Image (cartoon, rainbow, N blue to C red):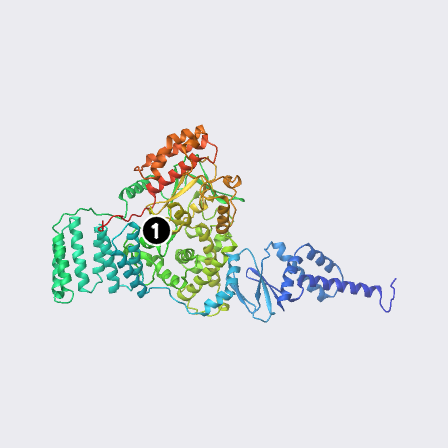
């Protein structure tokens, strides 16, 4: 029976209740929305009238996708209502239920509704007509979704908008700065007191001077002539002749040519080669043109002294910057071990360690596990001047790129090869991306790898398609294992490495992305016709811009985490620091490199493997402790436990690599083990350690003091000592630590990169 209450019946009340529930269901799913939730490409877009409404709506939509939304939806459709309301509720229900049913990630990104953005090759334009603000939910099926969101963030940043408005400034050659460096080099060269560090500094000044000078200029010829003077000063006659010929090819000044001819004649005499008389005749012919000039008397004296020197026996043999014995030793090593042969290890994956390397059999200390050729390298812009920018060959007399002010090469051949492979674009792009921020080496690696990757794939579109297919593969070992064998897959192996950097490093990676992306947009043809973008809004319309920006951002993080240091190969610190302090501070590093398989080595403060950057520019990975079959291989990303206390070690790892180490040394807080503070008297308290000290300590001391000529037999001797120490001593132990230290020294001196500038010279 219906009850009438002031005109209301039970039927009216039920209709009102139905209307209330229906309205509430719609509100829960789309509070303050402008009735728009759109799927476009691989994202969900929500448009609202205001930012506050949008901020309130996004969590509610996510909530409505849960059980609460489901309950309201079921309640709604079970009640009677008009046909139009029923249709609305069905639409809302589909909006609410589809995302959770399909399992999409709920990563909402708030944008201005006037924004244009791209997803999976398709562009969605809010256009300002749907509402004032919108929200985008990117799903996990596109390439580098997380990086794309970061790039959109970056493009919306004030810093990016600022850089896009200002003109590009090319960091390139500086003639006046180059002349100043050459003059400073001349001043130091004329000083009476020289040693290897002074010789290196003089050559550094001359080479940095050459970097900033136009090709074929008289100033460049003068710099080459100055370097040839240093070479003959160091009794490096063959290198001197090379530099003289290089200077003569561009010199126009007769007085400079006379100097060079006289110097070349002396070098030919020192080497016992023919041709010095012919060279002196050329000098005489030029001298006849200037003998009556203001410099005639000076050059007449030079000619006289040179002719006299050609009759005097030479006391010093030709010297070289390279160690021929070491070069032969490394060559023999590579006949025995195949580069990129990883047959002693497997790549495995677990939740704790991610991808990592494990031993396929028992491995002894001192045993070489594999040798890997780096995928890419970059040299320090100041300290890397003595190495070839392209092939890494040690070279005191590098020649500059014709256009930029940082790339130096060992020969015209390497210069041309680099230009064809990557430097034609790198030269233009990095010139406008270069600055002095702390991530500069990482930035150059990112520029170089982008160029190589695009060319490796055949274009930007092809690279994007390849990476899309690569990302869709769910194999945890992709990029490192193919057909059951470990092998590098070129750029994809680099792309697959970890990019889990610390939040503290974000400003560097965002800045790198801005500078590189801006330079790519304005100085390459990657985006079709030169777009001439002036506003970041325009950049967000271009899918290629977002793709390459995402790739730059990702690579910046990858290189920060995975690149390793190229050692300087010297026995002294160029800043005058103690050798160990220099190594810890990395103040004399030559540059960075990245090798994908080596990068799979996880960290421990008590590593069981060590790396040696070899004299032929490959990475030797060898064992420093016994490794059982199935055990994981661990490297140390910083200083070992015996050099640094736990607190600075953990801080460095967290800041640089975004993790805390839980190795045994960290868990048990092992003490530093100092070689200098432990005496044999203290070791007598421990009989096993005393016996090892009595057997090996004298050898260890001789190795550190360079009192013996090292050979492979010393690796075998130290290997036996390490095995004894690991079996018989509680760790940490003095002898275990110092046997491993000595083994590292032996590997470095036998196979490692070495750079030698003579201490003695003609001033002595």
* Residue at 42%, 50% in the rendered image: 563
Give the residue furthest to the bottom. 129
In the displayed structure image, the side of residue 515 where residue 10 appears, left or right = right
Pick the quarter of the image with the N terminus. Answer: bottom right
- Above or below, 182 relative to 587: below
Q: Dot 1: what SS?
A: loop
Quarter residue 722 falls in: top left
Q: Position of residue 475 (x, y in %)?
A: 50, 47
Q: Position of residue 186 (x, y in %)?
A: 26, 59
Compare residues 122 and 597 and report the one nearer the observer: 597
Q: Position of residue 461 (x, y in %)?
A: 44, 60
Q: Position of residue 322 (x, y in %)?
A: 28, 47
Quarter residue 372 falls in: top left
Figure label count: 1
Q: Mark yes or no: residue 597 visible.
A: no
Residue at the spot of label 1: 574
């Amino acid at each position: 029976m219906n009850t009438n209450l002031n005109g209301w019946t039970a039927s009216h009340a039920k209709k009102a209740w139905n209307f209330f529930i229906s309205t509430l269901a719609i509100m829960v799913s789309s509070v303050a929305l402008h009735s728009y939730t759109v799927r476009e490409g691989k994202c969900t877009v929500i448009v609202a009238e205001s930012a506050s409404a949008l901020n309130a709506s996004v969590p509610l939509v996510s909530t409505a996708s849960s059980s609460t939304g489901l309950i309201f939806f079921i309640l709604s459709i079970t009640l009677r209502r008009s046909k139009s309301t029923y249709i609305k509720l069905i639409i809302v229900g589909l909006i609410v239920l589809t995302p959770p049913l399909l399992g999409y990630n709920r990563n909402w990104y708030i944008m201005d509704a006037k924004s244009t953005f791209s997803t999976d090759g398709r562009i969605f334009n809010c256009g300002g007509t749907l509402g004032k603000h919108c929200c985008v939910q990117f799903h996990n099926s596109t390439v580098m979704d997380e990086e794309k969101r970061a790039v959109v963030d970056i493009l919306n940043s004030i810093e990016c908008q600022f850089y896009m408005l200002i003109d590009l400034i090319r960091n390139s050659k500086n003639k006046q700065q180059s002349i100043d460096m050459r003059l400073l080099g001349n001043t130091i060269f004329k000083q009476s007191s020289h040693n290897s560090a002074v010789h290196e500094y003089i050559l550094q000044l001359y080479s940095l001077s050459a970097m900033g000078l136009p090709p074929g200029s008289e100033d460049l010829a003068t710099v080459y002539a100055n370097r040839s003077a240093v070479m003959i000063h160091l009794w490096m006659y063959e290198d001197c002749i090379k530099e003289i010929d290089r200077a003569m090819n561009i010199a126009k000044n007769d007085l400079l040519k006379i100097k060079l001819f006289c110097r070349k004649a002396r070098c030919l005499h020192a080497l016992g080669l023919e041709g010095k008389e012919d060279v002196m005749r050329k000098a005489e012919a030029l001298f006849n043109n200037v003998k009556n000039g203001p410099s005639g008397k000076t050059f007449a004296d030079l000619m006289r002294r040179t002719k006299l020197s050609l009759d005097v026996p030479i006391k010093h043999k030709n010297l070289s910057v390279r160690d021929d014995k070491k070069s032969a030793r490394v060559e023999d090593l590579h006949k025995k071990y195949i580069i990129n042969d990883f047959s002693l290890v497997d790549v495995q994956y677990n939740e704790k360690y991610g991808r990592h390397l494990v031993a396929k059999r028992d491995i002894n200390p001192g045993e070489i596990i594999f040798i890997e050729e780096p995928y890419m390298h970059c040299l320090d812009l100041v300290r890397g001047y003595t190495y070839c920018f392209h092939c890494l060959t040690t070279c005191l007399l590098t020649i500059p790129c014709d256009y930029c002010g940082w790339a130096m090469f060992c020969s015209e051949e390497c210069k041309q090869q680099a230009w064809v492979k990557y430097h034609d674009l790198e030269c233009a792009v990095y010139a406008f991306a270069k600055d002095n921020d702390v991530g500069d080496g990482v930035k150059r690696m990112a520029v170089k790898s982008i160029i190589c990757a695009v060319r490796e794939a055949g274009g930007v579109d092809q690279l994007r398609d390849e990476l899309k297919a690569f990302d869709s593969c769910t194999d945890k070992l992709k990029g490192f294992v193919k057909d059951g064998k470990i092998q590098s897959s070129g750029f994809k192996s680099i792309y697959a490495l970890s990019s889990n950097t610390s939040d503290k490093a974000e400003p560097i990676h965002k800045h790198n992305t801005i500078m590189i992306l801006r330079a790519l947009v304005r100085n390459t043809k990657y985006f079709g016709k030169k777009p001439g973008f002036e506003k970041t809004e325009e950049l967000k319309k271009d899918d290629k811009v977002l793709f390459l920006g995402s790739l730059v951002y990702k690579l910046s993080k990858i290189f920060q985490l995975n690149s390793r240091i190229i050692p300087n190969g010297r026995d002294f610190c160029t800043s005058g620091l103690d050798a160990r302090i220099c190594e810890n501070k990395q103040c004399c590093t030559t540059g960075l490199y990245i090798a994908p398989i080596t990068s799979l080595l996880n960290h421990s403060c008590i590593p069981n493997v060590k790396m040696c950057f070899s004299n032929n520019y490959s990475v030797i990975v060898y064992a420093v402790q016994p490794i059982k079959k199935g055990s994981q291989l661990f490297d140390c990303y910083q200083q070992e436990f015996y050099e640094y206390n736990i607190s600075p070690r953990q801080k460095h790892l967290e800041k640089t690599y975004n993790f805390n180490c839980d190795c045994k040394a960290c868990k048990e807080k092992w003490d530093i083990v100092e070689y200098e503070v432990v005496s044999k008297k203290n070791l007598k308290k421990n009989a096993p350690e005393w016996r090892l000290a009595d057997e090996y300590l004298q050898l260890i001391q001789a190795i550190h003091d360079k009192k013996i000529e090292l050979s492979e037999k010393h690796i075998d001797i130290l290997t036996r000592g390490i095995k004894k120490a690991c079996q018989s001593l509680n760790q940490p132990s003095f002898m275990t630590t110092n046997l491993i230290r000595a083994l590292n020294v032996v590997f470095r001196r036998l196979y490692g990169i070495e750079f030698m500038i003579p201490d003695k010279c003609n001033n002595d």
